[in-house]
Each structure stands twice: as structure tokens, then as C-alpha cells.
Amino acid sequence: MSEGSDRPEVVITPESTEVTSGNEVQEKLIVAARVFSDLLKPTFGPRGLDKMMFKTDGTTSVTNDGAKIVAELLVKHPAAKMMVSMAESQEEACGDGVTTTMLLCGALLIEANGLLRKGLHPLTLVDGYSTSFEVSKEQILRDSIETEQAHLLSVSETALSGKVAEGAIRIFPNMIVEALSTIHENRGEARAEHVSMFKTGTGSIRDSRLVQGVILKKRVMMNDFPNHIEGARVACLDGDVKIKELTRGTELKITKAEDLDSFVEVEKSRKNTIFQSIFNSGAKVLLCSGDIDKDIIHMLTDSGILAIGNLDTSEIRNASEATGSRVVDTVLDLEEGDLGFAGRVFWERMQDTDEVEDIFRIEECPSPGILTIEIGGAGQTATEEVIRGLYDSLRATSLALNEQVLIGAGAIHSRMANAVRNAAETKGGKERLAMEAFSRALETIPSTLAENGGGDPLDRVLELRAKSTSDSPWGISSNGDAWEVQGVWHPRSVIINSLESATETAMGMLRIDQVISSRGN
């Protein structure tokens, strides 16, 4: 069949489908990424500002935590979704460095946009960025040093800088280091999940303290329960403390009063057997995830045993790891060897309201695997932001316990930029342009620190370049000035993961040559 000019076109997609090709693709992706990075730029560093997030359900939150801001945004643009995924990856891996990652990725794409407009091929940019990343990684390995105790405090302080928790910067770093060091000594590892948080709802942030144990919120079942138990043996039970109920409906026909009395006596005997199992074990505190029979509660009270029921499985597990007890599934299997120990157990009756939960404190555990930071402060929004800052600090400090550390305050990024520039001078092709763009993108970190601190970003970056030959690390102080950095440290993995995520995301966007949208523009 011959082809004619009136032959209909072959249509394989709906009319609503829009295809964008060429440099326009990269430009649209880069603009979207730039908007995202510019959103977080003012929050970066010790002098960063906060964002107020107004949610669809009417609630608000105030934060400068990059991970929190990214998680709250309702993102639709595909490029922005790639950056959100990158931020989530950084948060999951390190718990810190999300804003740094977003700024680096945005800077890499902005630098790439200028070279693309000049006709540089996207794959040439990708090759240059890949080479630059390897050079930067080598610089990171050269500048890494072994972690000492003083570094742990500095890592904790650095992660807290710029957060609401910075108001108590003198007490929280010591708490965090002490908590993680204690846990590491007792269980051979230490993670942020091993430190729980408890909000008192009273006082100020400076009233916060570290508890060698756990704090639970549950209603006190009886006022006659013993209080202020010293040297308590603690039992943890993942189940009920009552007679096991039948799975099928049963109907009993009793024709004699003696039979009824016998039935009641057997039931009492079974309850007494359960009580005797607890009493004979030597436990003074019983924690269980299920219900506790009322008659058994009275027996326990008369014997001076404190019982807390209907706890979550996670609360039982935390109490077990704090006290050193073994979680038992059946109360009749409870033995003395299953018990843990707490130096002091007491409870506080809270104001009587419909939703009140009393406070049980299990403290002064000799070798706790779980610790609690009790956070003071009556403001709900501020306290939540403090907790976010503490978790960031806990994650960063726990990483520093097991790896080397790097100097912060923009110094390591400035040194990486200098290394990439020196490596670019050995290249003769267009790849050199991409490497120079990579080095300028790295300088976005000290530049932003200087700008947010009130200094001149260009002057500070040029000053750091002049100091790049010095053996001493130079970065940006909180006032936006060039500064010989002291006491600002990051775990090595935070910097490497941040740089790797930003570089891979930027290169992934640069490889896209066509966007096919079935939803139109």
C-alpha cells in the first residue's frame, strides 16, 4: 500500500498525554528541585529560622527540621517526589543531614542548568559529577579521625544546634552521651531506639533529667497498692493474670447448694494458685500486658505487691530490658530466675479527669538496656520539637560511637570543593567544567551558613578558598564569619550518605531526556 499525505497518523496515547523533550525536560526538573531546596535554605545551620506547618486537619507545628518539613508537604511534582525520596533515605540511614542533602542536590542541579544551556551534554555532566564524588569521598577518608569522648559531646551539640532543644544545650548533650555510653556498655550496642522519651507536661526544658529505667503511664487500679518500693524485684508477663476463659460457651446445671459451693471453692483455689506463683517467685512489682483478676489484685495488695496491667507489648519489652527481667508468657511459669531488679519503684496519682493516666516510675536499675529522658516543659508544640531534636542528636551520637568523625561548620565541604578543583585541573576535556560546577555546589553549604549567620556569602567562600591550603580546618561560625573550627563534628556516615544521595539524585534527573505525562501539563 502506498503512503499518502492524507493517511491518518498512528495514535498510541490519549490526546491528554503530553510529551516534553530536550533541554526543556532538565529545566523543568531543575526549577522544581530549586524551589524545594530554596524552601529549606533559611532553616539551615545554628542560626536557621523555623517554618510553621498548617495541616489539613487544622493542627499546626513549628519546626526547622528538614525531615519533618519534607514529610508534611503534599508533593505532586515528579522531581520534587524524587527529592522527597532522597530525604527519606537520608533520614532513615542517619537520622540527620536531611537539609544538607536537599541543599546539595539543588545546588548540583542549578550548576548543571547553566552548563546545559551552554550546550554541555547531560552525560558529560554525569561523568564529571561521578568523578567529583569519588574525589570528595577520598577527601572525606583523609580528614576522618578516630572518635574520642570529647567528640561525642560535640557531635551531640552539633546535632542540637539551631533546634528548640538548644535552649538546654548545656544539659542534653551530657544526658545523651551518658545514656548511649551506658547502653553500649550493658548491651554491646547503642541506638536511638534504646532511649525513650517521657513528657512531664510541667516545668521547663531545663528541668529535664536522665532516668536509669522506664516511666509508664497507666491508671492505678487500687489506692491501697504499695508505693515507694525500694530494691524491687520486677516480673514481666506477656499475658493475663486470671483464670483462662473457655473458648466455647458452656452451661452448668447446679441442683445442690453443695455443688455451687464446691464450684466457687475450685475457682478460688485456681486464683490462689496464680497468686501463689507470683508470691513464691519473690516479685514485688508485676507488669503484664493483659487483664488482672480483681480477686487476685486484692491478694497482691494484701501481700505488698504492686501490679500494673494492660500495658503495651513494647512497654513490657522496655521494662524487661531496663530491669534485666525475662518476659514470661504464662504466670504459672514465673520463677525467681525470671525476675529483674529496680532500685526504686513508685507511682504518682494525677489529677482526676476522664482521660487521666497515672505515672509509674521504675528507676535506678543497675544495668539498664533501656533508659529514659524525662523532658520538662508545658508547651506541647515546643516539647514535640525538642523530642525531634533529641532523636536527631541520639542518632548522630550513636553513629559516632561506632565510626570516625569529620569536622563540621562547612569546613569539610570547603575542603572537598578544593580537592575537586585541584583534580579538575588535571582534566583537559569538558568534564572539567562539570567538576568545577560540582566544587561550586559543595560551597553552597558554607555559603548558606554564612548567609543565615548574617555574613556575606561570597566574601566568606572566597576567604575559605584562600584558607584551603592551611592544615587547620576553616569553616563558618554561627555569626557568619570565617572561623578556625573547633568543637563542631559530624559522624562520617552522615556526610558520605548525604553527598552520595544528593549526587545520585542529581545525576538521575540529568539522565532524564523525556517526560511523558498522561495527565497533561
Image (cartoon, helix red, strand yellow):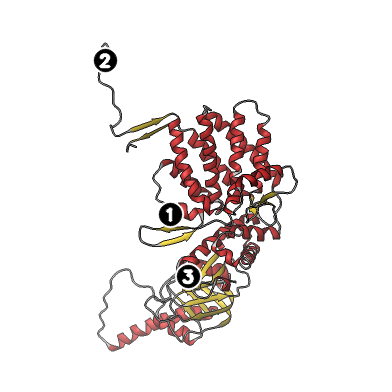
Name the amino acid, label 1: Glu
Q: Report how far apart the C-alphas of labels 1 and 3 lie in the structure.
A: 21 Å
Residue displayed at 43% across by 83% down: 222
Name the amino acid, label 2: Ser
Q: Report how far apart the C-alphas of labels 1 and 2 lie in the structure.
A: 54 Å
Q: Position of residue 12 (x, y in %)?
A: 30, 28
Identify which residue, 31 or 373, lies in the foreground.
Answer: 31
**Residue denoted by label 1:** 72
**Residue denoted by label 3:** 379
Would residue 199 appear left or right of 136 to someone viewing this image? left
Q: Position of residue 397 (x, y in %)?
A: 62, 58
The quadrant the N terminus occupies is top left
Q: Is residue 140 visible?
A: no
**Residue denoted by label 2:** 5
Identify which residue, 356 or 159, lies in the foreground.
Answer: 159
Q: Is residue 410 above or below residue 118?
A: below
Are circles 1 and 2 on residues that touch, CB within 8 Å? no
Task: Identify the secondary structure beneath mark 2.
Answer: loop
Q: Is residue 75 above or below residue 322?
A: above
Q: Position of residue 263 (x, y in %)?
A: 33, 83
Kindly give the residue lying farthest to the right in the view shown: 471
Looking at marks 1 and 2 on the same chain, the residue that comes earlier in the sequence is marked by 2
Looking at marks 1 and 3 on the same chain, the residue that comes earlier in the sequence is marked by 1
Looking at marks 3 and 2 on the same chain, the residue that comes earlier in the sequence is marked by 2
Q: Is residue 361 above or below residue 138?
A: below
